[in-house]
Image (cartoon, rainbow, N blue to C red):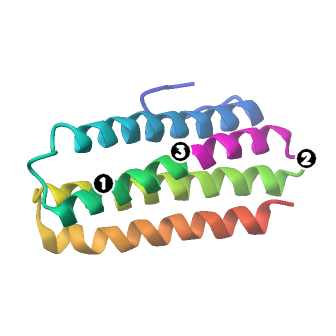
Amino acid sequence: ANIITMTSDDGNSGSSALLLRYATFLGATGVSAGAFGAHALKDKLTNKGHENWKTAVLYQLVHATVLVGMSAFHQSATSKNARNGTVLAGKLMTVGTVLFSGSIYLLSLNVGPKKLLGPTTPIGGLCMIAGWIVLGINAS
């Protein structure tokens, strides 16, 4: 397994490990973002900025937790469709979370082009929704 590119080529257990790596990445950065927002940004963000920041952290940590469960589900899934669907759903949720939460963090900090970041948030949300749908369709 390659920790830098988050890829693996060792079959079923490698895909479960990949989902777990996605979860740990989102979890660690989510906790860090939460602490950063609560302490370092305490006096720098507006009330709306704080609320948006908290929303981004919440979605990030929820999806990190879900990815842990998906890793376990993938490990025990008996059908190839369920395993493949779980990996696809996990990738969609991970990309969606990075786009959704990441764009909200940047918008809250007033960093980057709003014309690009504004549409990135709903695109990330759509990726997360697609991940949930793919998971539901392939969960049997």
53 is higher (above) or lower (below) than 123: above
Q: Earlier in the sequence, mark 2 or mark 3?
A: 3
- Coordinates of residue 106 in the picture (x, y in percent): 19, 56
Residue on which disc 2 sits: 78
Residue 32 appears left or right of 21: left
In the rendered image, residue 69 lying in the magenta stretch gets the answer yes
Q: What is the number of the mark on residue 84?
A: none
Question: Which residue is drawn at the image coordinates 47% and 72% (left, top)?
Answer: 126
Q: What is the number of the mark on residue 64?
A: 3
State the image quarter where residue 74 is shown: top right
- Coordinates of residue 49 in the picture (x, y in percent): 19, 61
Q: What residue range appears in magenta?
A: 65-77
Mark 1 residue crowding within 10 angstroms, few (<14) / some (14–19) / many (20+): many
* Predominant secondary structure, magenta span: helix
Question: Which residue is drawn at the image coordinates 69% and 40% (left, top)?
Answer: 71
42 is higher (above) or lower (below) than 35: below
Q: What is the CA distance from the residue labelled 2 to the residue labelled 3? A: 23 Å
Q: What is the CA distance from the residue labelled 1 to the residue labelled 3? A: 14 Å
Q: Amino acid at mark 1?
A: Gly
- Coordinates of residue 7 in the picture (x, y in percent): 54, 35
Question: Which residue is drawn at the image coordinates 53% and 45% (left, top)?
Answer: 64
44 is higher (above) or lower (below) than 112: above
> Considering the numbered disc 1 on the image, is that residue within a helix, a strand or a loop?
helix
Q: Nearer the viewer, residue 33 or 92?
A: 33
Q: What is the CA distance from the residue labelled 2 to the residue labelled 1? A: 35 Å
Q: Earlier in the sequence, mark 2 or mark 1?
A: 2
Q: What is the number of the mark on residue 102?
A: 1
Question: Which residue is drawn at the image coordinates 20% and 37% (left, top)?
Answer: 39
- State yes or no: discs 1 and 3 in contact (Cβ < 8 Å): no
In the rendered image, residue 75 lying in the magenta stretch gets the answer yes
